[in-house]
Amino acid sequence: MGNRLWIPAALLGLLGLIMLAVVPLTAGLRLAAGVVTAACFAAVLYIRHRMKLKDAEEERARIQRLAQQEMLLTINHLRHDWMNDIQVLLGYIQLKKYDHLHGVVAGVMGKLQHESFMAKLGDPGLIVFLLTAKAEGRHMKLEVELDQEVNIRKLALDGDAVCKLIPELIEGFKQASAGENEEGGMLSMQLVSEEDSLLLDFVYQGPYNRGLLEEALSLALESGTGRTLAAVVEQNDYQEQEAALALRLPYRTSVEV
């Protein structure tokens, strides 16, 4: 109901303008009509402003709900993985196959180390994106390989650009992967911090649309983000069931401005 109040206010304002332009009025009446007209149009502007604020608030709430749903999906996925590990451990204990426990515990420790590396990438938005992408995995599975701690925000790079480029590249592979009604492939991404650069190595295995993939990767690398990082393509290979992309992002030197 409140959203429609601007309509009568606008009509009153237009009526006031017509009276000022057409109807002969005394000075006092013209002043009164002018005040009413100005007040009506001010009310219209205020109501429209409130409507825009409400729409913006509703959009923020919608985005927040989507983010919460994605986070719940990620948490449930992680919980499911850990429950599987615990069930395997309990199964070996119940069967008294203690010689199998060492391998399972080693796998759990490796997973803990990997998740620790993931949590220390230095950018909460990127971390959430990677965890969510790993949890979804309906049309394309994602594996992130980290053999060492890499804090992107502490590297001599444009951290914002790196944290924007990585999701763009992953989304490019996802878009080119098999359609919604087909089984997607697997994308493996490795991040390696070397002495003079950050290496991003992507290997996709499975069905994909080569044209879509080449276009998506080219757009990401030729965008402002890609140019900011001066990315060097070391490998760009497309096979029937496999595609590989290796990028080297040079660190800034002390002499650069």
Image (spheres, grey):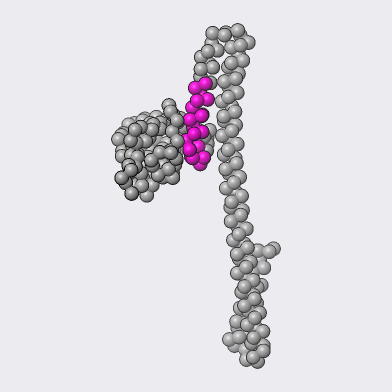
Horizontal relation, residue 13 to residue 218: left or right: right
Q: Quadrant of residue 146?
A: top left
Let me know if residue 13 is in the magenta part.
Answer: no
Provide residue 109's location: percent of width, then percent of height.
52, 21
Residue shown at 57%/8% (left/top)?
97
Q: Nearer the viewer, residue 233 or 160?
A: 160
Q: Is residue 208 left or right of residue 105?
A: left
Q: Is residue 77 left or right of residue 172?
A: right
- Residue at coordinates 63% horizontally, 82% vertically from top-left? 34
Q: Residue 26: x and y, percent?
A: 65, 92
Boundaries of the magenta span: 109-127
The residue closer to the viewer here, 78 or 249, is: 249
User: Of 80 and 103, which appears nearest the observer?
Assistant: 103
Res. 91 image quadrant = top right
Q: Write down the quadrant of residue 243 in the picture.
A: top left
Residue at 61 percent of width and 45 percent of height: 65
